[in-house]
Amino acid sequence: MKAVVLREFGEASNLRLETLPDPRPGRGEVLIRVHACGVCYHDVINRKGNLPRTHVPAVLGHEAAGEVVEVGPDTPGWKVGDRVATLQRLSCGECALCKSGRNSLCKKDNRFFGEEISGGYAQYMTAPVMGLGRVPANLPWPVAATVCCTLGTAVHTVRTRGRVRDGETVLITGASGGVGLAAVQLAKLDGARVIAVTSGEAKVQALREAGADEVIVSRGLDFAAEARKRTGGEGVNVAIEIVGSATFAQTLKAMAPGGRVVVVGNLESGKVDLNPGLVIVKELEIIGAYATTREELDESLRLVADGKIRPFVAEAVPLADAGKAHFRLENREIAGRLVLLPQDTQ
Ligand SMILES: [Zn+2]
Ligand SMILES: [Zn+2]
């Protein structure tokens, strides 16, 4: 098979098309013919050598979608022809956390596709079935590939962890990225009033189209006063914190009493000052949100297939262009997701 192999961490041009032996599925695994694989900023970080669990030579890609062409032993319920998409990470399905539905916290099996497990920048990949969701028949492959890492994360954040309810006001920071635009649409679908915060005027249109009721353009990141003004002085019930340390203090100031802050991103990996007094007198909840479960991926794929949430694919390119795709992503030339087409290769 053809695959894009990273033999040395570093430049985008290190991603090169090679011929590798076809993989075979082991116990609990299926073999997937990969029809599409999203290129995520996480892959850029991985390519540079900043993820300690990846060892070269490596095949990157955790946003794969395709059809099952062979099933290994111990894969009940899976058959040749099944349409699948990968989760970001695995879980064991058997520990106390998994049994309570919190698979994204499992420590017994926390392997990632594109890190410990060979990923989707290839014509074929093997995948443990614990890491797969089911793709509805009418969903195009490039769309299916990108759902998990955008809408899947938003479902986990807005619904599972944030418990956003009809009539609540939801503030979303970093709203114009892939997770942000999905979160805006989902919160609207669930009946919330959405205040989106973004750093640039150029992104306002996309946020309006996603359904944001209010858009605050905040270059200096001082949006709390504006958010309070736009809620009649009340503050917001829920904040989806996608930016993290850079906006956290303002987000706290924007909260209504009893508010819930769901932290899902920390782009600059920074720390924050927290005044416990504020948390006490407002009875604030600060909630973490991480990755996606299989049920949430299935739910997300259905939401897109039913036309309730708009997908995020900007462009699909041949597998051999993986290096170029990384270069463009790093240089911020892409709005939305770039997708590789592994079957489209010479
Ligand atoms: Zn991703
Ligand atoms: Zn587990």
Image: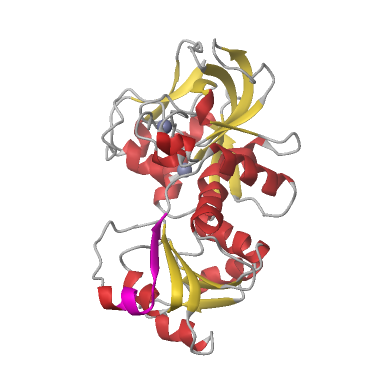
- Which of these two is toward me, 11 or 48? 48
Is the residue 115 above or below the residue 335 in the image?
A: above
Is the residue 165 above or below the residue 305 in the image?
A: below
Q: Quadrant of the C terminus?
A: top right
Magenta residues, start to end: 278-288
Q: How is the image coloured?
A: secondary structure
Residue ID at (62%, 46%)? 300
Is the residue 346 above or below the residue 155 in the image?
A: above
Residue 32 visible in image? yes
Quick check: is 331 in the magenta stretch? Answer: no
Specify whether 203 is left or right of 110: right
Is the residue 229 above or below the residue 314 in the image?
A: below
Residue ID at (64%, 44%)? 299
Q: Position of residue 275 (x, y in %)?
A: 25, 75
Q: Position of residue 97 (x, y in %)?
A: 42, 38
Q: Position of residue 232 (x, y in %)?
A: 53, 89
Q: Quadrant of residue 220?
A: bottom left
Quick check: is 285 in the magenta stretch? Answer: yes
**Count of residue discs:** 0
Residue 346 visible in image? no
Q: Position of residue 20 (x, y in %)?
A: 45, 14
Residue ID at (75%, 33%)? 137
Specify whether 80 is left or right of 286: right
Q: Quadrant of residue 113?
A: top left
